[in-house]
Image (cartoon, rainbow, N blue to C red):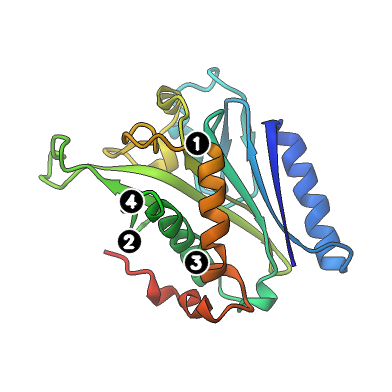
């Protein structure tokens, strides 16, 4: 059984990290089931284990938190759904690459519930939206905007941290960082793309598409194989 919890109020980031640490300890000890928490945070930046100081463009704009998750700098704030996934990879195969691919596939399927095509790219973890209507990059390649970021940490093969999907955040807040260390491309959200999606709508889509990628007891977990998520 996986316990789903949605928290309607803004959750201070240190409180969320402390709660995740405690929950992972309880999962490892057999005292609590796996969990998926759906939260929002006040405006802040987090620095993953690969964060570069030069990518923090405006260090005084919002609080900055160092975190043990993978990845670089990212933004969290109101209007963004942060999904903390505390899942036991002992039940799903001890394969970090496959787990990240499954998270990406989960997000892509959830976005498809709204008719949106999310895509992934080699060397760029997360989910991207092609923007052919925007001017091309200097090298002639198409611009793409990131709609979902992924950064995880494992403790004895139990995951925590997770992913963040932009529903309707203030996209100008990303100007204080180089998101995930990637220059040239931008960020977007469901509402920015013209989709009147609410946080509740996204939560429902995430729950509806979870089993196909992350339920170890579902037949559909054949999608767990990372090769099912084609990288281009």
Q: Nearer the viewer, residue 121 or 190?
A: 190
Q: Earlier in the sequence, mark 2 or mark 3?
A: 3
Residue marked by disc 1? 198
The image position of residue 146, as x and y in percent, is 36, 43
Q: Quadrant of the C terminus?
A: bottom left
Q: Is residue 51 above or below residue 93?
A: above
Q: Is residue 51 visible?
A: no
Q: Earlier in the sequence, mark 2 or mark 4?
A: 4
Circle number at residue 122? 2
Q: Nearer the viewer, mark 1 or mark 2?
A: 1
Residue at (51, 70) in percent of width and height: 212
Q: Nearer the viewer, residue 84 or 108?
A: 108
Residue marked by disc 4? 115
Residue marked by disc 3? 102
Q: Callout 1: few (<14), some (14-19), or many (20+) C-alpha neighbours within 10 Å? A: few
Q: Quick one: SS at disc 4?
A: loop
Q: Quick one: SS at disc 2?
A: loop
């Amino acid at each position: 059984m996986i316990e789903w919890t949605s928290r309607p109020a803004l959750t201070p980031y240190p409180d969320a990290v402390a709660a995740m640490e405690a929950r992972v300890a309880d999962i490892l000890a057999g005292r609590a089931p796996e969990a998926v928490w759906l939260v929002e945070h006040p405006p802040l930046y987090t620095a993953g284990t690969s964060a570069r100081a030069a990518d923090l463009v405006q260090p005084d704009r919002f609080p900055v938190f160092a975190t043990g998750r993978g990845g670089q700098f990212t933004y969290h704030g109101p209007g963004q759904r942060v999904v903390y996934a505390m899942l036991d990879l002992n039940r799903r195969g001890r394969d970090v690459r496959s787990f990240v691919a499954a998270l990406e596939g989960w997000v892509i399927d959830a976005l498809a519930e709204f008719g949106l095509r999310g895509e992934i790219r080699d060397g760029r973890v997360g989910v991207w939206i092609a923007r052919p209507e925007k001017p091309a990059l200097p090298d002639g390649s198409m611009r793409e905007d990131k709609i979902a970021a992924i950064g995880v940490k494992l403790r004895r093969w139990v995951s925590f941290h997770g992913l963040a999907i932009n529903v309707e955040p203030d996209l100008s807040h990303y100007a204080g960082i180089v998101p995930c260390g990637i220059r040239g491309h931008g960020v977007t959200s469901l509402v920015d793309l013209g989709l009147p999606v609410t946080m509740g709508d996204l939560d429902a889509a995430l729950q509806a598409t979870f089993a196909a990628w992350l339920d170890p007891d579902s037949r559909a977990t054949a999608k767990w194989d990372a090769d099912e998520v084609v990288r281009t």
